[in-house]
Amino acid sequence: MHGKALPYLLLMPATLFLCVFFLYPFALVAFEAFTRDGGFTLDNFRTMAGNWKFPVAFWNTTLLAAIVVPIQLVTALLMATVVSRLETGRGAALYIFAIPLGISDLAAGLIWLAIFDQSGFLNTLLSNLGLVDRPVMFLGYQSKLTIFIAVVLAEIWRATAIMMVILVAGMGLIPREYHEAAEVFGASPWKRFVKITLPLLRPSLQTAIILRVILAFEVFAVVAALGGTNLPVLMGETYNWQFSLQDRNVAAAFALLILAISVGLTLFFLRALRVPKEARI
Amino acid sequence: MAEIAIKQVAKRFGGFTALHSIDLTIADQEFMVLLGASGCGKTTLLRIVAGLETPSQGEVWIGGRRVDHLPPRDRGIAMVFQNYAVFPHLTVFENIAFGLRMKKLPQQEVERRVNRTAELMHIEQLLKRYSGQLSGGQRQRVAVARALAMEPDVILMDEPLSNLDALLRLEMRAELKGVLAASKTTTIYVTHDQVEAMSLADRIAVMHQGHIVQAASPVEVYRNPAARFVGSFIGNPPMNFIPATKTANGSWTVAGLTLPGPKSDKHKIDFAIRPEDVDAGNEGLHATVRVIEPLGPHTLVTCDVEGGLFRAILESNATIAVGDRLRLAPKADRIRWFDPETTNAL
Ligand SMILES: Nc1ncnc2c1ncn2[C@@H]1O[C@H](COP(=O)(O)OP(=O)(O)OP(=O)(O)O)[C@@H](O)[C@H]1O
Ligand SMILES: [Mg+2]
């Protein structure tokens, strides 16, 4: 009983918890996605894919992720580098950068709505400066591009810090001596970043990117606040089918699709940023 | 031409002074060894020369150029780190090639230099491995090879052979000395192994608590220690010290023996002699044998002299036994005297 079994016994409660509150609901959703009126069918997926909003939602979500995540990655790397170099006040800087993390995505959406709204800060500012005669409709249904840009901005503002925090922790794990050796052997600051920091940061980059990509495909509240239904996204469509159209089976199909995308991308980044065992710090 | 001049360099870490106003000049192509006990500031001094640490005061000059404001990569140096700093994400080959790639040398030249230095360090069969697949001693040799491959004007080595077994260390030591002499490199070599220091150095700088106590040739450091610390730190077993009392001006009594010595207005000074510089005979220091350790051709005899420990290396002689009273005659030209207050040589 002691020895080999003990770790498994200790993991038991957590495993049970996962099974009851995750696997079981997951099985239920999967079951709903593949059935209709009691029989197995792929109709739900056909309905999902056949709806005119589906391709729009799919591309909007993908495009958002493809634009937001790289920008966030670069910004987070920049911020993490700066924060890691601070000799004093590192804690304070981390807290300040991390403030948006404490705000829910809906609240974040509302904050940016207050900026871009017809009677929002931006319009007030522009008219006070005399640049516009009357308020501009930034987020109207014809201005999809502005809505998209507003969502990108809100997402970057909201969720860059999570990547930064992970990267700061990762950079702290890289022993100083490697940077020093690179410095002595002629590497400029940029070369040190590319040849030493980035490769040794791979495990943290992996975590940060996977986490962020999954969150990007689940984008919902920010889009709902800023664009309503003018900018369909996958999660919004799931909500729509579940509550407005009252079709749990198609909603379940959407949920499964998002899950499949997340799992697929996770596997991709696990492989792409894998560090061979012998090359770890 | 790469003469190194360290001028009044001091380093403080908060309230702690790691280096007190160090002055040291290392001639072009000279092999300088920094020798001292753990924590005396060897690594700190080396890092200041490398540019990895900023001195709290003072100047560093390399090849007639003031460098203390320059980043490490502009100083024309290569370095072997005390903790190796072999990059874990690169193979041994790429580790050795790192600096060469930064210099944008052609691939052919990179390969030539990597292979040559790897061969020199006996790691040519490890070139494809990662740092995580190497032993400590192998990692250390990679670090040395990486520095040698740069063919720099100045090479800084922080205990580069500390992790090798005795035999390999002996071999590497000889190889290093040969290579560095042939390549006309100016070397600063940190060690706390005095045998290594003796065998490699053109000059040894003995460090103690952030000071350089003496910088001189190995023989000079051994024969004429500038301070009591040098005598007791160098030599195994170390120098013997016995208090001496003035009998007349320039004449001192040491353990029952009256000897001519320095003229001093002090009443007590320290007499010093190396263990191998005494002979057992009818005249000399009064000694009582405590421990006898045969070393083959010689015997290490530990005695009581004036209530203190005294070690003598004598011709092997089966007749000496524990408890014997001996007279140990010091060789006149090997006697040294030290001021007990300043601990400096008189
Ligand atoms: N970054 C630092 N902050 C504070 N004290 C330091 C720092 N680096 C070194 N010291 C102190 O300075 C002194 C000299 O350290 P240094 O590393 O130069 O010793 P060393 O002679 O190389 O010793 P060893 O033979 O053990 O490597 C030590 O007392 C050490 O505790
Ligand atoms: Mg050291």
Image (cartoon, coloured by chain):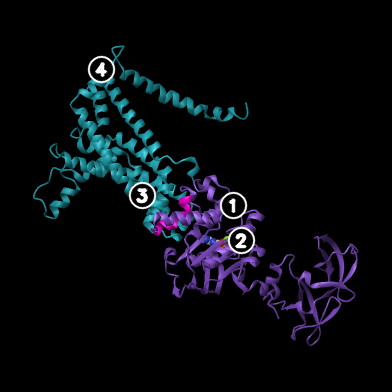
Chain colours: A cyan, B purple
Q: CA distance from mark 1 to mark 3?
A: 36 Å
Q: Could you tell me the amino acid type at mark 1?
A: Gly
User: B263 or B135: which is nearer to us?
Assistant: B135
Find ligand 1 in the image and state its quadrant: bottom right
* Mark 3 vs 2: CB contact within 8 A: no
- Which residue in the protein does label 4 denote? A43
Q: Residues within 10 Å of mark 2 (few under 14, many from 20)?
A: some
Labels 2, 4: front one? 2
The residue pinned by badge 2 equals B173
Whether discs 1 and 4 lie on one chain: the answer is: no
Instruction: Find residue A77 and name its label.
Output: 3
Q: What kind of secondary structure does the magenta stretch mostly adopt?
A: helix
First in sequence: mark 3 or mark 4? Answer: 4
Closer to the eye: label 3 or 2? 2
> Is label 4 in a helix, a strand or a loop?
helix
The dot on residue B287 is none
Rendered position, B59 above or below A110:
below
Classed neighbour count for the residue bearing mark 1: other residues with Cα under 10 Å, few (<14), some (14–19), many (≥20): some
- Whether labels 2 and 4 belong to a single chain: the reply is no
Q: Secondary structure at mark 1?
A: helix
